[in-house]
Image: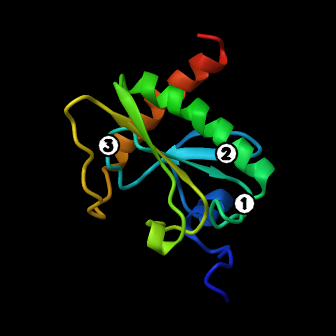
Amino acid sequence: MSATAYDPNNIFAKILRGDLPAHKVYETDKVLAFMDIMPRADGHVLVIPKTAARNLLDINPDDLADLAKASQFVAKGVKRAMAADGLTIQQFNESAGGQVVFHIHVHILPRWTGVALRPHSGAMENQDVLAKHAATIRSALEAMQAGG
């Protein structure tokens, strides 16, 4: 397998297939958004396309457009739900660019003035905390979809 081939057994592909659980906050026929299990900020969400794409370098442009639209919508909901002052949006490509999971994904991190991001320590967040944040974000997104 070449270094740039898509691996259908990556963790996000397993989540998409239902082989692994995730705290989902938003889903369409094109994308899935869920809580990062090792969040660098409370409310840290990942948005992924349902299509098999390694990263920005190989994703179909139409699928990238769907990912971008969903990322914007989810980001607005995360900011609202978490009462954040701002957001950091991150997307990494290849190992040298910081990519660890080789299924394209967008990180949405709510930010508050004077609060630094937590280091990426590899420690998993408590599942109850993730479930609580997911429910708060889902409620905000549902309100937005309803025009609220």
- Between discs 1 and 3, the one toward the N terminus: 3
**Left/right of residue 105 with respect to residue 67 in the rendered view:** left
Q: Are marks 1 and 2 in contact (CB under 8 Å)?
A: yes
Relative image position of residue 22 (x, y in whole percent)? 52, 52
Quick check: 128 above or below 8? above
Quadrant of the image for the C terminus? top right
Relative image position of residue 106 (x, y in whole percent)? 54, 49
Q: Amino acid at mark 3?
A: Ala
Quick check: 129 above or below 51? above
Residue 67, disc: 2
Residue 124, disc: none
Quadrant of the image for the N terminus? bottom right
Q: Nearer the viewer, mark 2 or mark 3?
A: 2
The reply to whether residue 94 is visible in this rendering is yes
Residue highlighted by disc 1 = 59
Residue occupying the point 36% across, 22% down = 83
Colour treatment of the image? rainbow
Instruction: Give neighbour class at mark 1: few <14, some 14-19, many 20+ (Cα, 10 Å).
Output: some
Q: Amino acid at mark 1?
A: Ile
Residue occupying the point 66% across, 87% down = 2
Relative image position of residue 56 (x, y in whole percent)? 64, 59
Return the residue nearer the eye: 133 or 112. Answer: 112
**Res. 112 image quadrant:** top left
Q: Amino acid at mark 2?
A: Leu
Residue highlighted by disc 3 = 41
**Res. 18 image quadrant:** bottom right
